Amino acid sequence: MVSKNVFVKAALITAILLLISITIGSYIEGSAYSKFDKEILRMNENSEAILIMQSFSSSNDPKICSMISSQIDAINSDIYSFRSELEREKSTSILMNYDAIKRRYFIANARLLALTKQYNNKCNGTDDIILFFYISEKDCPECYVQGKALDDVRNACKNAKIFSFPIDADMQIIKSFMAYYGIEHAPAIIIDKENEKDIAYRDLVSAPAIMNNLNCKGAD
Amino acid sequence: MFALGKRILNKKKRPIEFAAFLLVSIAAAYHSFVHIGYYWTVLIPNLFLLYITTVLLLVYLEDKDKYDYVSHEKLLPPVSIIIPSYNCKKTIGKTIQSIKNSNYANDIEIVVVDDGSTDGTREFLKNIRGIKLITKQVNEGKAEALNYGIQKCSHEHVFCIDSDSYVEKNSIRNMVCKMLSDDKYGAITCFVKVANNNSLLGKVQEIEYFVGFGFSAISNYLIDAVFVTPGPLTLFKKSAVIKVGLFDAKNITEDLEMAWRLRKNEYKIGYVYEAAVYTIVPGTFKDLWRQRIRWYRGKLSNIIKHKDMLFNPKYGYFGMFVMPFSLASEFAAMATVYFLMYVIGYTIYWNILAIASFLELNSLTLSNLLTGVMGSSAGMIMFLIVVIPWITVLIISHKLGNKKMGVKDIPFISFFLFIYSVFLSAVYVYSLYEEIYGSDYSW
């Protein structure tokens, strides 16, 4: 007859196997996490570089403006793809908490928004600044639909710079933006017209309707 | 797989209970996916299954030396072999020939009970010498045919064999020797193998049979908890079968039910892996689906019928371990199926409605499942938990089945582990639905 120890041993083996699996899993997730960490660090360094370049010249220096423009384009592109990868990794991650990375991502996004606005001011830039406010913690089909329309805008207009922020993230900078632009619900879109009145969409809006209010410069 | 006449048993419908079960189970799964996480919802039942598999592995590895190999008795008794037949003209000749080819050192009485065949089987059987043919005019089902044969046969040791199953030369001798080794045996089971293993489905079922009738059967035998007296071939003591009231003709898995009833009546059930029978398995997913719905519904209805055995220490590891394990596998199957439905639902939501965007919020779609989860830590943990114990089980099972595992088997093993198991999970869940709803039994 089988000994009762078998049941205890099986429990131990199961626990050990789970532990080994989790250790390997932690290593895999840790590698992915550190990749995102480094990427955020790199984006922040590049933003710092833009800030330093902007302080080099107080006037509209074409050489510096051109450098800043290409750097803003590069970071904006990085931030855009970073976002998709981060969400995908987050949805399949079971061991790591990506909240800290996400918060740093939104700070980086907000910093780039400020730098883009400064660039437009100083360099007479023509980048279209679009802010997109959405809900992240609950299902928001309208937000997905609006996000899809913004994908189309981005693909059609090289100079459209989209900055997206979840209104349900407990972050001071996002709350400040919401207060500044008068945002209470999501989805909402603001086209920040530096020297004119901002355009606000508080209901779903199509890509062509958004593009009608942009200085769209064609695809990448 | 006995060629079955179409039999229908009407059951009382329970639409309200079914709707309640469906709602509660879906709500529980959704709640679990959202609040505990889809991954842990699937992982936890699988961890339980891992534990059970590990117990059986340890039982086998620690106690395999206690397996009492068949000692060949000099004085073997005459035996009867009952073959219930129904429209099986193409296969029954080979079944009878395989019995005649056995190296059994005493008389073998072959009793064929033709259960109202309409395809000329009866005429075919009349031309075969050396069999006792009993013909029934009306088709009443396999269990009734077996009962009829058991009462009409001459000997105490009675084999029941399906009309599309073929015995190995030594199987009858080895099983009788095992029966003679202990008076408490009411039945002796054997290693059921797949005869038609020449297609993908055949090969996958061959792997499944190696595990079920090899590794699982011997491990269950070592803890005295043999689960079933398989239809393809089992040796019974006639007196035991009559004492427990013969086969239940209204039961869709009469072989399973007989095993449980024998156990209730304090008979032991033995297992001999040195005795093999080859059986024809379903060749299409449609036939397989029908067969497994019948098996799983039969198991569920028998758990209800014999619920007094569940968690009852009187029935040893059978009541305390094997039955609960079998029931628990239903929950693991439900978690898997609901998880896949959730993923498929999300995929439709994102892709068919074309609302996927750069937001990618909670985007657990099929493509992300394959490219994301499978390559992530979640996938790695699940992979290790499923694959390591299962590879061990498969190696042991193939060894017991005297078949070498090679590189060419990897596609079939992968199919078995990752696709066939999902198919079986779906069958489990569908069977559960049908049983709760009270769909008519059809077999």
Image: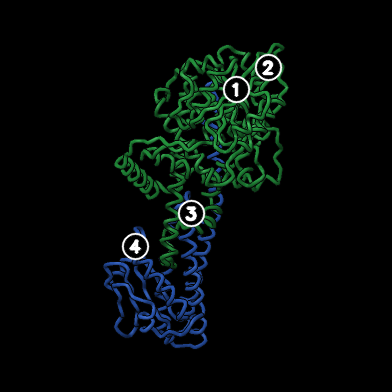
Chain colours: A blue, B green
Does A187 appear above or below B55?
below
Disc 2 + disc 1, Cβ < 8 Å: no
Say whether residue B312 is left or right of residue B186. left
| Label number found at residue A169 | none
In front of the other: label 3 or label 4?
A: 4
Between B173 and B203, the one lying in front of the other is B173
Residue neighbourhood size for the residue with mark 2, other residues' Cα within 10 Å, grouped as few (<14), some (14–19), many (≥20): few
- Work out how far the residue at label 4 is from the one at label 1, CA to CA, in angstroms: 64 Å
Does A119 appear above or below B67?
below
Q: Which residue shows up at 32% across the image and 64% down it?
A: A167
Q: Secondary structure at mark 4?
A: loop
| Label number found at residue B159 | 1
In front of the other: label 2 or label 1?
A: 2
What's the chain of the residue with tag 2? B
Between A157 and B138, the one lying in front of the other is B138
Instruction: Indicate the amino acid at tag 4.
Output: Cys
| Snapshot quadrant of residue B230 | top right
| Label number found at residue A92 | 3
- Work out how far the residue at label 2 is from the one at label 3, CA to CA, in angstroms: 65 Å
Q: Which of marks 4 and 3 precedes in the sequence? A: 3
- Where residue A61 appears, as percent x and y from the top left, is 48, 88
- Work out how far the residue at label 2 is from the one at label 1, CA to CA, in angstroms: 13 Å
- Work out how far the residue at label 4 is from the one at label 2, CA to CA, in angstroms: 77 Å
Which residue was labeled with disc 2? B107
Give the quarter of the figure containing the N terminus of chain B: top right
Q: Secondary structure at mark 3?
A: helix
Instruction: Indicate the amino acid at tag 3.
Output: Thr
Q: From where the camera sits, is residue B389 visible? A: no
| Label number found at residue A140 | 4
Say whether residue B415 is left or right of residue B241. right
Say whether residue B405 is left or right of residue B373. right
